[in-house]
Image (spheres, rainbow, N blue to C red):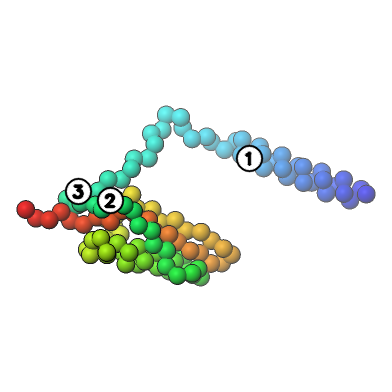
Amino acid sequence: MPNVALICAVALGAALACGSAKAAAPSPDANAEPPVQSGPPRGYTCGDKAFTGSGPGFKSSQEESEEAAVKDWLEKTSTVFADADWNTAKDAILECVKQGLYSKCFATGVPCRPKPKE
């Protein structure tokens, strides 16, 4: 029975240490401005809705997963703007999830293209 008490004491000490570490972490500045939503790049016009691309399955490299997500996004957006580019997408977000050593990324953004010349 003494082993159970020792294990509980160690677990409680670890929990308290984690709690105090979180309390000591700096809190976000109350005066900080919220992030600004990105608008269309200067000289570009954008579509009405965002598209999400992810590519097939999980990849062993996060870089490959990011590339697959952007490639899938470009394929989906080509139905709206044939000349859409990930670098000029409005509100572009690239998020990745990990499962063990593998990752899957999701590219979301509104496609944009250069405004037609008048």
Quarter of image, res 88: bottom left
Q: Spatial distance from mark 3 to mark 1, Cα to Cα?
A: 44 Å
Residue at numbered disc 2:
48
Q: How far from the left and from the top, in percent, is residue 14?
A: 73, 45
Q: How far from the left and from the top, in percent, is residue 30?
A: 46, 29
Q: Secondary structure at mark 3?
A: loop
Rendered position, 73 above or below 26: below
Residue at numbered disc 3:
42
Q: Residue furthest left?
A: 118
Q: Around disc 1, counting alpha carbons within 10 Å, would you say few (fewer than 14), some (14 to 19), or many (20 or more)? A: few
Q: Indicate the amino acid at tag 2.
A: Asp
Question: Which residue is drawn at the image coordinates 44% and 56% (left, top)?
Answer: 95
Viewer can see residue 63: no
Left or right: where 31 falls relative to 114 = right
Q: Which residue is at the front of the view, 50 or 95?
A: 50
Q: Secondary structure at mark 2?
A: loop
Q: Nearer the viewer, mark 2 or mark 1?
A: 2
Q: Nearer the viewer, mark 3 or mark 2?
A: 2
Viewer can see residue 7: yes
Question: Which residue is drawn at the image coordinates 56% and 67% (left, top)?
Answer: 101
Q: Spatial distance from mark 3 to mark 2, Cα to Cα?
A: 17 Å
Q: Of the two numbered discs 2 and 1 on the same chain, state the one appearing first in sequence.
A: 1
Q: Residue furthest top?
A: 31
Residue at numbered disc 1:
21
Q: Which residue is at the front of the view, 25 or 116?
A: 116
Q: How far from the left and from the top, in percent, is residue 80?
A: 25, 60
Quarter of image, res 82: bottom left
Q: Which residue is at the front of the view, 99 or 8?
A: 99
